[in-house]
Amino acid sequence: MLQDIPTPRLSESRPAVLQTQRLTLRKPVMADAIAVTELANDRRIAENTRRLPHPYSQNDAEQFVGSLHDEAATDAVFLIELDYRPIGMVGIDWREPDLPELGYWLGVAHWGRGYATEAVRAAIDYTFEEFAIDQLIAGARVANPASRNILEKCGFQWTGVQLHRFEAIGSSTPVDCFKLSRGVWSSLKNWASSTRR
């Protein structure tokens, strides 16, 4: 799923556990494969993520989790936990080292509660703080306005529409494409941390 592509790091490599107000983000381990399978094996999720097959088997989850321990740039892939229970995934795909791509999904029972936005913001912060990259890209199916809204709330700017192939539907479909530059991210971080007197 992810390739072994070296990425320039800003600091020494270390396993990351990210904490947000409600969530914990950590590297998935093989023991998480059952929970990941139960969450990801939903057609509504697969139809909105380019690379998830449907049905999604435990073997698919085990192969994915196993691949994360074999590859160098996968320390920016996180299992999202709420109260110590997995609810989804968020991470950066390094297939194109100059255009790292943000991806995420949540189990359907957790949609509409702000968890995805919270997890995506944490993954974005981690990626810009740890890796020497100029920008992140992301996409959302045109038919998925909720995902588009998450990206916009996180500072991503719309760059156009492209056709992308989705494994679960077996064809290409229009995708809204977005980018977030380091400069915009930095400005948003500074603006959010400033206090008005």
Image (cartoon, rainbow, N blue to C red):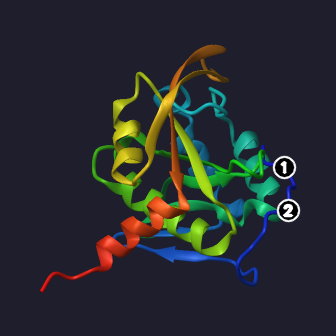
Q: Which of 128 and 91 is in front in this view?
A: 128
Q: In this view, does 123 lie to the left or right of 21?
A: right
Q: What residue is at 62 percent from the left and 15 percent from the top?
A: 172
The extreme top residue here reads: 171
Say the numbered circle drawn on residue 6: 2
Quadrant of the image for the N terminus?
Answer: top right
Q: What residue is at 34 percent from the left and 70 percent from the top?
A: 22
> Looking at the picture, how far across and down is residue 170, in whole percent?
66, 14
Q: Is residue 126 left or right of residue 21?
A: right
Give the amino acid at mark 2: Pro
Mark 2 Cα within 10 Å, few/some/many (few <14, many 20+)?
A: few
Above or below: residue 94 compared with residue 19: above
> Looking at the picture, how far across and down is residue 133, in whole percent?
67, 62
Quarter of image, res 195: bottom left
Give the amino acid at mark 1: Gln
The extreme left residue here reads: 197
| Residue pointed to by mark 1 | 3
Helix, strand or loop at disc 1? Answer: loop
Mark 1 Cα within 10 Å, few/some/many (few <14, many 20+)?
A: some
